[in-house]
Image (tube, helix red, strand yellow):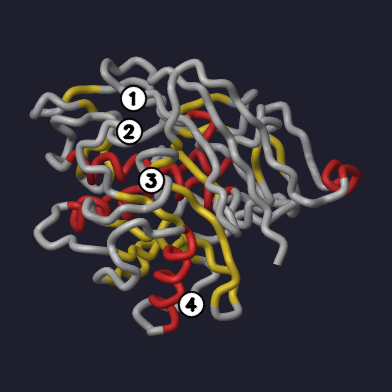
Amino acid sequence: MRVLWRCALISLVAASVVGFTAIAHASPTETAPPRVGNSISHVGMSTRGRSPDGLPAGARAARTRTTSNGISYHGGPVFTTAVNVYLIWYGNWSGDTATTILPKLVTGLSGSPYYKINTTYYDGANRHVPNAVTLAGQTTDAYSQGHTNLSDTSINTVVTNAISSGALPKDPNGLYLVLTSTDVTKSGFLTSYCGWHTNATIAGADIKYAFVGDPGTNSACSVQTSVSPNGNVGADAMASVLSHELEETATDPDLSAWWDQRGYENADKCAWTFGTTYKVANGSLANMTLGGLNFLIQRNWVNASGGYCALSD
């Protein structure tokens, strides 16, 4: 199966919040590379554009619809129904409040002003991404692939096993999020990226899945390393990366729909920028409330009015 992939290496200043880590995007180099998000870099690093996808130049141009909003449509599908989110808790999550925080984030995104930004994206039939997310299921995986140096293939296997075992249903309208605990190491995580999304044929269906690791207090992927809105620095960092990968999956599920001339998907264009923030009781920063909790979430690109980064549409 021909794998479409892109890499984007973005130079970013961490917006207006003091102490933020400047992070960018890069691609792993395994056999079937996923779409990497929130990769790690330093301010001033140069940018790279979209990698070749194997299509003749003429074919690529013919399926591309350039917009005036700084991002273009390339002919592939988008989610035209609610994204059914499945959480796979990999490793040891015993006693970790992430198992409460992240599900509340997912349910809180549905119908929110923030997730509404994705409704500015559409497919070739002008069907727009709906402002709807469903937490459709959760399961655990106690180190089936070990706990050190997991590969991209390991993440695919975790998803495949969850489906084949019946722990989670086979759902082409789903996004399977593999969430790894702090003791799990993954090739590239914390050194090249903080998360990624991709798709693959699993059990005969087009399955979308993503990786988001718990960075703990590691400043490579945790924007606030001492305090955070929900008192769990690692989980709050994961919330921002999870949101980033979810909105990219909704608008570019098969890596064939929306990106700009540099190869950046919607969330890439606003990565590690947070807009207007406020302080919560413990002194940490937040910029939105979802599911009754405060979060500090990266902005997303609005595909309208010339295009711009925002926290709501």
**Could you give the CA–CA distance between mark 4 and mark 3, rounded to whole angstroms?**
27 Å
What residue is rendered at 66% in x and 27% in y? 70
Q: In which quarter of the image is residue 179?
A: bottom left
Q: In the image, 116: left or right of 212? A: right
Instruction: Say what amino acid the circle numbered 4 marks.
Output: Lys
| Badge 1 vs badge 2, beta-carbon distance below 8 Å | yes
Seen from the viewer's position, the closer of residues 106 and 199 is: 199
Q: Work out which quarter of the rendered image holds the N terminus and state it.
A: bottom right
> Which secondary structure lies at badge 4?
loop
| Badge 3 vs badge 1, beta-carbon distance below 8 Å | no
Residue 213 drawn at (x, y percent): 32, 50
| Badge 4 vs badge 3, beta-carbon distance below 8 Å | no
Between marks 4 and 3 in the image, the one whose residue lies nearer the viewer: 3
Label for residue 170? 4
Label for residue 220? 2
Query: Which residue is the site of mark 3?
Result: 189
**Could you give the CA–CA distance between mark 1 and mark 4, rounded to whole angstroms?**
37 Å
Query: Alpha-carbon neighbours of circle 2 within 10 Å: few (<14), some, or many (≥20)?
Result: many
| Badge 2 vs badge 3, beta-carbon distance below 8 Å | no
> Which secondary structure lies at badge 2?
loop
What residue is rendered at 9% in x and 28% in y? 281
Image height of 299 relative to 189, above or below:
above
**Could you give the CA–CA distance between mark 3 and mark 1, rounded to whole angstroms?**
15 Å
Q: Earlier in the sequence, mark 4 or mark 3?
A: 4
Query: Which residue is the site of mark 1?
Result: 21
Instruction: Say what amino acid the circle numbered 2 marks.
Output: Ala
Residue 76 drawn at (x, y percent): 71, 54
Between marks 1 and 4 in the image, the one whose residue lies nearer the viewer: 1
> Which secondary structure lies at badge 3?
loop
